[in-house]
Amino acid sequence: SDAKPKISYLDPSVSLQAVFTSFMQQQQQTNQVMSQLLLQLCKESKTDEPAVSAQAPATKTYPISSSELPKFSEIISTDDAFRYLGTADIRSLSDDDRLIVRSFKFFSFRARFTKLTRLLGDDARLQHLYCCLVGQAQERAVLMDASTSEELFGSLAERYASAADPGALEDTIRHKLECSVPFPTESIAEYVSRFDQYYRFAKEVSPNFSISEPTCCRLFLHSLRSRTALFSAMVYASGRKVSRLEDIFSLARDCESNLRASPPHGLSPEVKR
């Protein structure tokens, strides 16, 4: 038999080293048995687990009230006229002026509405869009019978860009850019904002707008001749080769700030304003 004889730990003839060696061998055998048992239990546990099917993540909803969203109306208020044309005299607005104000209102509304509802599903967005249209704008939208918010926005854009002539709005904005000048009580910063708005909306109405950005820079420089000769000369000297509106606008604001900080002797109150 290969069985090893048991060691009697009380036998005085057995050395301490032999006792220790025997103990370690028994401990090793015990550890091997426990490892095999744990491995078997793990296999059985995995076999008994029910299969879990992959599920699509739950769609989150973002509740929002129509009262929290911007509104659009065809009616032109005093604030609308001043914001987009720099005048509060509604009665003096021409048909072209009313066209451009209403169009600007719509494009501004669309940009804000789209950003505020970007987390909503399209069904909810479409319902909110109907609720955010006021008066005749809502009546027209209902008759359009759109099935998506993009479809409705497309129909509304076509309506408010020009009801009769698709090129009318572009022609109107081109005229505004070519003939634009700062209003008597308008600061350079306010004029920059208004001029830039004309160009941005023109590009939105027509991506291939007939007036290029470098040409708009020259038109802007030309329009500043209505200011003092010194201010106009300062901007023109540094901006005549600029081809980006962002750069020419920054230059004009800097010139105005510099003149305000250290106005030369005898400077017209127009620049000190």
Image (tube, rainbow, N blue to C red):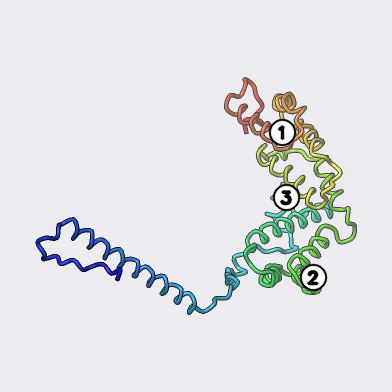
Q: Nearer the viewer, residue 236 or 245?
A: 245
Question: Which disc is residue 84 wearing?
Answer: 3
Q: Quadrant of residue 188?
A: top right
Instruction: Name the front one of labels 2 and 1.
Output: 1
Whole-Å distance between the Cαs marked 1 and 3?
Answer: 21 Å
Q: Are marks 1 and 3 in contact (CB under 8 Å)?
A: no
Whole-Å distance between the Cαs marked 2 and 1?
Answer: 41 Å
Count of numbered labels shown in the rendering: 3
Residue at the front extreme, as displayed: 1
- Quarter holding the N terminus is bottom left
Q: Of helix, strand and loop, which one carries label 2?
A: helix
Instruction: Name the front one of labels 2 and 3.
Output: 2
Q: Nearer the viewer, residue 78 or 43?
A: 43
Question: Which comes sooner in the sequence, label 2 or label 1?
Answer: 2
Q: Identify residue for label 1.
A: 248
Q: Of helix, strand and loop, which one carries label 3?
A: helix
Q: Quadrant of residue 133?
A: bottom right
Whole-Å distance between the Cαs marked 2 and 3?
Answer: 24 Å
Q: Identify residue for label 2.
A: 140
Question: Which comes sooner in the sequence, label 1 or label 3?
Answer: 3
Q: Of helix, strand and loop, which one carries label 1?
A: helix
- The residue drawn where x is 37% and y is 68% is 35
- The residue drawn where x is 76% and y is 54% is 101
